[in-house]
Amino acid sequence: MPNLADQATELRRLAGGEPDRWAGGPPRHVAVLAGKPGAGATTFAVNLAAAAAQSGRRALLVDADPICGDAAAACGVRSAFGLGEVLSSECELADAVVSSAAGVDVVCGGVALGTRFRRPAFAAGLIEQVQSLDELPDIVYWDCGCGPHDWLSRVLREADLALVTTADSISLLETYAAIKVYGRRGGRSISVAANRCPEDGRRCGWDAYQRLQRAAWRHLQVSVAWGGEFPLDEQIQLTAIQGLPLAHQNPTSTTGQALRRWSDDMISSQSRRDRRGGLRQG
C-alpha cells in the first residue's frame, strides 16, 4: 500500500491536473545557494520543494550542503543512506531516496561532503542516477548551502539558480560572486530572494536586489529575476524543528504564499525556455 506522502502527492495531482511536464524531457534542476552562512539556503530549498509538491509536481530534494546538511531533519525524515554513501559507491541514489509527509522525496546529506569529496569527478554520475530513477521527478532541488562547491560544479554551472541573500554588503558581494562564477551560461533562469529583511516598510531587500541586478547586468550581462522579500519569520524556524516545511504546514500564511509565488515563478520561467529540461546529459 502506498505511504501517506505518496497518496497525498497523487491526490494533489488529481485535484490540480497533471502539471505542464515537457514531453519526454529530463527533470528540471534548481541549485539553491546562499550568499553567506545563515542566510537561509536550506530553509528555502526545503520550502521551495514543498511548494512545488503543493502544486502537484513530484519534487526531489537533494541535501548537498557541504558544511551543514540538515534538510532531511527539516522534512522530518532520516535514512541509513545519504549522499555521502552514494558518492562513496556504497549505494545507488535510488537507495537513498526517502518520502516525507510534505510530499517531497529527499536524499539526505552526508558527513562533511565538502571535505570528503573535493573533486568534481565524485559527483559526475549523480545527474545520470537522477535520470535513471524509477519514478522520475519533475523538479530536483539541490540544497547547496554556501560552499565550497567545487565538487558540485556541474550542477551549479548548469542548473537554474535560486540565490538567497540578506541585505548586508557581505552577503550581496558573495551572491554577486556566485553569479559571476556560476551564472554566465545562457539558457537558464537565475533568481534572487532577500531573506531576514526588517518589517519596517523600507523594502531594503528590494533595494539590495536592484543593486545586485544592475551590477550583474552591467559587468556580466546576466539578468537576475526577483524572488521576493522575506522577513525574519519565527514560524518558518518552528516548522523546520517540527519536521514539516512551512510551505506544506501553513501554505496560506504570508510567507507560505510568497514561497509559492517564487516556486511558481521559477517553474513558469523554466517552462518558457526550450523544453530540453534541466542538465545536459553526458
Image (spheres, helix red, strand yellow):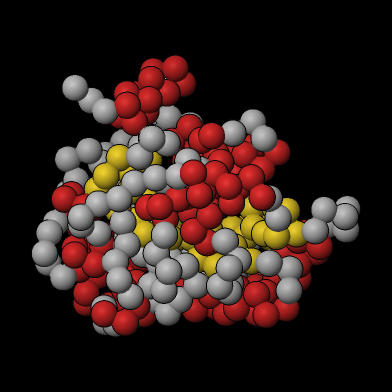
Above or below, 116 against 85 in this view is below
Closer-to-camera residue (20/264) = 264
From the top left corner, tell me how far across and down residue 170 is, in percent: 67, 80
Q: Does residue 160 show up?
A: no
- Residue extending furthest toward the left: 90
Closer-to-camera residue (183/46) = 46
Q: Residue at x 12, y 67 (%)?
A: 89
Above or below, 67 against 231 in this view is below
Q: Does residue 4 show up?
A: yes
Q: Is 259 on the left or on the right of 72, as rendered?
A: right
Above or below, 278 against 39 in this view is above
Closer-to-camera residue (89/267) = 89
From the top left corner, tell me how far across and down residue 134 is, in percent: 17, 40
Above or below, 194 against 117 in this view is above
From the top left corner, tell me how far across and down residue 49 is, in percent: 45, 45
Q: Is 198 on the left or on the right of 270, as rendered?
A: right
Which quadrant of the structure image shows residue 62? bottom left
Q: Quadrant of the C terminus?
A: bottom left
Closer-to-camera residue (64/279) = 64
- Residue extending furthest toward the top: 15
Q: Residue at x 52, y 61 (%)?
A: 41
Q: Residue at x 25, y 59 (%)?
A: 82
From the top left corner, tell me how far across and down residue 113 is, in percent: 31, 73
Q: Residue at x 42, y 23 (%)?
A: 12
Q: Quadrant of the N terminus?
A: top left
Q: Is 69 on the left or on the right of 78, as rendered?
A: right
Which quadrant of the structure image shows residue 65? bottom left
Q: Is 30 on the left or on the right of 264, as rendered?
A: left
